[in-house]
Image (spheres, helix red, strand yellow):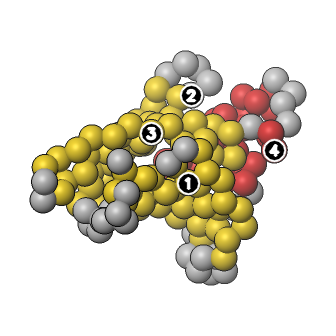
């Protein structure tokens, strides 16, 4: 069993909130000096870390599933292009504001497909990770 930790952070990590959904953990972190970073951490049940290939998708308001890219990582850590994520979330923000929704109550599901390369073989996982729209767009 593999655990997925998603960190939305800005450089120096100071936790704001941690949300756990089964074996997926989302950490909202605040930093001081740099741009927002979106990081995915994949560990096995014994906390082992392996090379990973991760593809990220988000379901958009127009019913399209948008690919945000494929990324490689060592030691189970992958850094995702935050600009692509923020662009997709801004589109969600505009759509939801047009519908009169409270953005603080909305989590957008990000789909993570990953292959984990271990000495015992290659494993695949798929996880849907809810990210809070207002926190991500507000720079946390």
Q: CA distance from mark 4 to mark 1?
A: 19 Å
| In this rendering, the label closer to the viewer, 4 or 2 | 4
Name which of mark 2 and mark 1 comes first in the sequence.
1
What residue sits right under mark 4 in the picture? 104
Q: Earlier in the sequence, mark 4 or mark 2?
A: 2
Quick check: marks 4 and 2 in contact, CB under 8 Å?
Answer: no
The residue that mark 1 highlights is 25
**Res 127 label:** 3
Asked if the residues shown at circle 2 and circle 1 are in contact, with their CB atoms under 8 angstroms apart, the answer is no
* Element marked by disc 3: strand
**Residue 21 visible at all:** yes
Residue 120 left/right relative to 105: left
Left or right, residue 5 beside residue 1: right
Report whether 44 appears left or right of 119: right
126 left or right of 59? left
The first of marks 1 and 3 along the sequence is 1
- Residue 60: which numbered mark, if any? 2
Q: Which quadrant holds the C terminus?
A: bottom right
Local crowd size for mark 1, using a 10 Å CA cut-off: few (<14), some (14–19), many (≥20): some
Q: CA distance from mark 4 to mark 2?
A: 18 Å
How far apart are the two marked residues, 1 and 3, measured between alpha carbons? 11 Å
Q: Nearer the viewer, residue 110 or 43?
A: 43
In percent of width and height, residue 72 lies at 27, 57
In front here: 39 or 117? 117
Q: CA distance from mark 3 to mark 2?
A: 17 Å
């Amino acid at each position: 069993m593999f655990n997925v930790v998603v960190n939305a952070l800005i450089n120096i990590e100071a936790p704001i909130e941690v949300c756990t959904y089964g074996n997926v953990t989302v950490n909202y972190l605040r930093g001081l000096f740099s741009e927002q970073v979106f990081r995915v951490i994949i560990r096995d049940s014994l906390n082992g870390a392996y090379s990973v290939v991760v593809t990220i998708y988000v379901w958009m308001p127009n019913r399209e599933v948008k690919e945000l890219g494929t990324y490689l990582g060592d030691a189970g850590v992958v850094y995702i292009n935050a600009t692509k994520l923020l662009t997709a979330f801004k589109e969600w923000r505009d759509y939801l504001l047009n519908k009169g929704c409270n953005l603080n109550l909305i989590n957008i599901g990000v789909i993570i497909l990953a292959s984990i390369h271990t000495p015992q073989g290659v494993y695949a996982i798929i996880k849907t990770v809810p990210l809070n729209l207002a926190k991500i767009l507000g720079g946390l």
